[in-house]
Image (cartoon, helix red, strand yellow):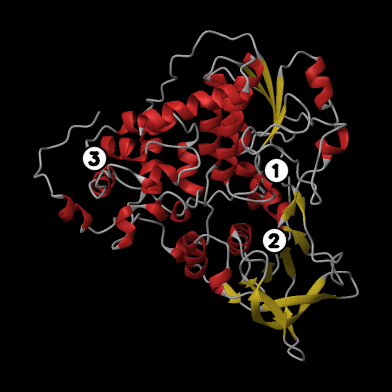
Amino acid sequence: MSETPEKKKLTTKERMQLPRNVMPEQNPKERVKNFKEVPYGYTAELAMAEAERCIMCPKPKCITGCPVEVDIPGFIKMVSEGKFVEAAQKIKETNALPAICGRVCPQEEQCESVCVLGKKYKPVAIGYLERFVADYEREQGKIEVPKLPLSTGKKVAVVGSGPAGLTVAADLAQMGHKVVIYEALHKTGGVLIYGIPEFRLPKSIVASEVDYLKKLGVEVHTSFVVGKLDTVDELFESGFDAVFVGTGAGLPNFMKIEGENLNGVYSANEFLTRSNLMAAYDFPSHDTPIFVGKNVAVLGGGNTAMDSVRTSLRLGAENGYIVYRRSRKEMPARIEEIHHAEQEGVQFHFLTNPVRYIGNEDGWVTGMECIKMELGEPDASGRRRPIPIEGSNFVLPVDTVVVAVGNSSNPLIPQTTPGLETNKWGNIVVNEKTMMTSRPGLFAGGDIVTGGATVILAAGAGKVAARAIHKYVMGIPFDEENKEETEQAAKAE
C-alpha cells in the first residue's frame, strides 16, 4: 500500500471538471524504428489523479459495459487511495487478465462509452488505470494467488489458450476444478501471442498472465493439436467431464482476385505470426525470415490491418499504405490505433479497392491495380456499402501486400467431432446463455463462435461458459440455477 499525503476533498462537480490525464508514450519518430511498447503507462501520480475524476455513480453503467463484469468503481476508488495492489486484486475477482485487457480492449466502445462523465467531458481512463494497477502488482512482485476451494474432483479440458480459453481456465480453477489447457502452438496465448505485435502487447505480459493461471493450478500442454493428436471424443474418453473449445478464427480470408499466388502477397495471419510468434523482426538472431519490401500495402481497416502496416514500417518499409474500401468513419480499428498509425507515417487510401495484383517474370508482386469507390446505402453491417466508380482504375506500385480482410473459424474441431453443429460460416453453434454446443458437455466461445471479434468479448464468452460448465459438471440444472440468480437479483434491486 502506498503512502499518500492528505489533500483537500473535491466536490463532485470539481471532479467532473478535472481534465483526463494523457498517458506518456514514445516519440513517433523513435518508436517506428523499434518494437518496444508505444505507451509508457501511467505513473502512480497520474493514476491517482485520473482515479480522482471518477464520481462513484450510485448505479455505475461502466460495470454493465464491461463484458467480464469488473467492479470498476471499486477498483478505481482503491487507486485514488493509493491501494494499487488491492485494486489489482479487486479486478482479478472477475478478470484474470487485467494487464492484457488494459492494453488491447476497446474500452472506448465498452466501459468508457457509458461513463457518465462522457456525456459532457471525457470519460474516466478506465483502461489506463487497469493497466497501471496490473503492471504495479507485477513489477512490485506482489502477485498473490487467492485461496482456492477444495477440489471438486471434476476435470475440464480447454482447447486453445487465447483470451476465451485463458478466462475459462482461470474461472474454473478458482471454482475448484482441475483444468488442462491444450494449445496447438509452441507458446501459450493464442492470438495474444501470434497476432498482436510486441509494441502493442509485450510477450512478457502474456507470459506473466499465463504464469498466474499456472499458480492457480491450471496445467498447460503446448504443441498439442486437438483434432490430430487427440480428438474431442478422445478427451472425454480419457476422463474429462467437460471440454471447452476456444480455437479462434485462424483461417485467413483472401479476396480471390488475380495474382494472389504471387510472392510477396501475405495473409495477415502469416505476416504477423512470422513477426510476433517466430520473432522474424529479430532475424537472423531468430530462425524465421520475413520479406518486407519498400512499398507495403495492407488491405483492410481493422486492428489487424493497423498492426500489420505498423509492423511493416518497423521492419524497414519506406512506405506503408492502408487500402480500405470505405471511408475513415467506417473503419473498425480502434481510434487509438488509427491515431498511432497516422503519427508513424502510415498513408491511407480510403474508398479504394484492389482488383488484381501485378507481378514480374520472377513471380514477385510489383503493383496492385485498384479502383476508387463511393458509399451507397448501409449494408447488413450497418456501414454504407462501397460501390465501384467505373473508369477510376489506377496502379499502386507495391512489392509487399498483406491481406487483412478478416478470418474464418478454425475448421479442425468441427471436422473431427461428429454431431457438432456449425453455421454456414463454419462457426460452432452454441446456446448463448450457456455456451453449450449441440454436444452435451462440449462448450465453445470466442472467435470460433462469433467469428473474428475482440479480446474482451472472447473473455466475456469465457466467463459465461465457465459458469455453465461449473453447473454442468456439478449436476446443477441450468434453469433451476438461473431462476435462483434471477430471484436474488430482484431482491437486490
Is residue 62 left or right of 235 when viewed as pictured? left
The mark nearer the N terminus, 1 or 3, is 3
Q: Please tell me which residue is depicted at 32% across the width and 40% down the height of the picture.
A: 73
Residue farthest toward the bottom in the current orientation of the protein: 391
- How far is the residue under mark 2 from the one under mark 3? 41 Å
Q: Mark number for residue 150?
A: none
451 to the left or right of 151: right
Task: Judge depth for marks 1 and 2 and give the one in front.
Answer: 1
- Residue 182 in view: no
Which residue matches tag 1? 449
Please state the horizontal and vertical placement of residue 258, each as a whole percent of the image: 87, 72
Disc 3 residue crowd, few under 14, some 14–19, many 20+, Cα 10 Å: many
**Is mark 1 in CB contact (under 8 Å) with mark 2?**
no
Q: Residue at x 55, y 37 (%)?
A: 206
Distance in Å between CA atoms under marks 1 and 2: 20 Å
Residue 302, percent from left and from top:
61, 61
The Cα–Cα distance between marks 1 and 3, rounded to whole angstroms, is: 39 Å
Q: Please, what is the three-letter code of the amino acid marked with disc 1?
A: Val
- The residue beneath circle 3 is 80
Q: Is residue 17 visible?
A: yes
Sooner in the amino-acid sequence: mark 1 or mark 2: 2
Q: Is residue 337 above or below residue 287?
A: below
Closest to the observer, 9 or 384: 384
Q: Quadrant of the C terminus?
A: top left
Position of residue 16 relative to residue 87, above or below, is below
Q: Earlier in the sequence, mark 2 or mark 3?
A: 3
Foreground residue among 254 and 41: 254
Tell me the amino acid under the disc marked 3: Ser
**Residue 247: image x %, image y %?**
72, 38
